Image (spheres, rainbow, N blue to C red):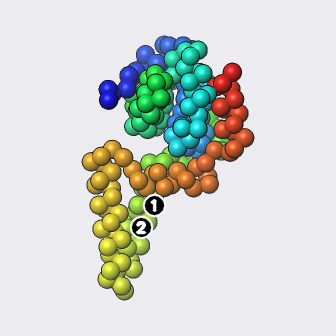
Amino acid sequence: MNSPATIGPTQAAERLSAYTVIDVRTPGEYAAGHLPGAHNVPLDHLRTALPALKTAAARGELLMVCASGARSASACEQLAEADIAATTLTGGTAAWIQQGHPADRDTARATWPMERQVRLAAGALVVAGLALGSRYRPARWLSAAVGSGLVFSAATDTCGMAALLAKLPHNQPRATGLDATLDALSR
């Protein structure tokens, strides 16, 4: 399969009005800062959104966005399997904001970015494994398992822990919010 088409933040800012922007991060991450006019369709809800995205793509280009570009590239691959063309923002919202482009925020709904949630969970599990390991030696395997998972995550550019954390209630879209987004994309 070919790599998805990419565009940098400067070029995307120049053409932003030509795109339907789809942010595939969790609702909390989206609320913390997203491209102006972006629609939030979390990556784990992308299959449900395919009909609406196909309609939106028929009207113009789709720009897929996440924090760093990894999840949006995955979204582009899933869309390509469904014969929907999309472009990913290189460097994601992190690069967008770092280059001084505007970002909309919903501070009432914002949660920690997924990377920070993963660091907290991984760190807490490692410390717990070491602390419990002082009384029950096999508990040290928890620390070893988390460390191995982090190495695997870095080597494969995937993150099982992020996939699990994305399923927590604070990282889930409100049903009415996702329905409204899909309705807006279908029009």
Task: Give 84 or 75, whichever is nearer the viewer.
Answer: 84
Q: Secondary structure at mark 1?
A: helix
Return the x and y of residue 158 as percentages of the image width and height: 36, 46
Q: Which of the 4 quarters of the picture holds residue 53?
A: top right
Task: Give 166 or 45, whichever is nearer the viewer.
Answer: 45
Residue that extends furthest to the front in the rendered view of this protein: 82
Horizontal side, residue 134 vs residue 109: left or right: left
- The residue at 66%/32% (across/down) is 181
- The residue at 43%/30% (across/down) is 81
Q: Is residue 172 above or below residue 15?
A: below
Q: Is residue 89 something that shows in the picture?
A: no
Q: Is residue 92 above or below residue 129?
A: above
- The residue at 62%/54% (across/down) is 169
Q: How many marks?
A: 2
Q: Which residue is mark 1?
A: 121
Amino acid type, callout 2: Leu
On residue 54, which mark appears?
Answer: none
- The residue at 39%/50% (across/down) is 159
The alpha-carbon separation of the residues under discs 2 and 1 comes to 6 Å
Q: Which of the 4 quarters of the picture holds residue 150?
A: bottom left
Question: Mark 1, residues whose alpha carbon is within 10 Å: few (<14), some, or many (≥20)?
Answer: some
Task: Give 65 or 178, whichever is nearer the viewer.
Answer: 178
Task: Give 18 or 187, whichever is nearer the viewer.
Answer: 187
Quadrant location of the C terminus in the rendered image:
top right
Return the x and y of residue 65 as percentages of the image width and height: 48, 31
Q: Is residue 177 something that shows in the picture?
A: yes
Q: Which residue is mark 2?
A: 125
Quadrant location of the N terminus in the rendered image:
top left
Q: Secondary structure at mark 2?
A: helix
Return the x and y of residue 20 as percentages of the image width and height: 56, 21
Amino acid type, callout 1: Ala
The answer to the question of whether label 2 and label 1 lie on touching residues, with beta carbons closer than 8 A, is yes
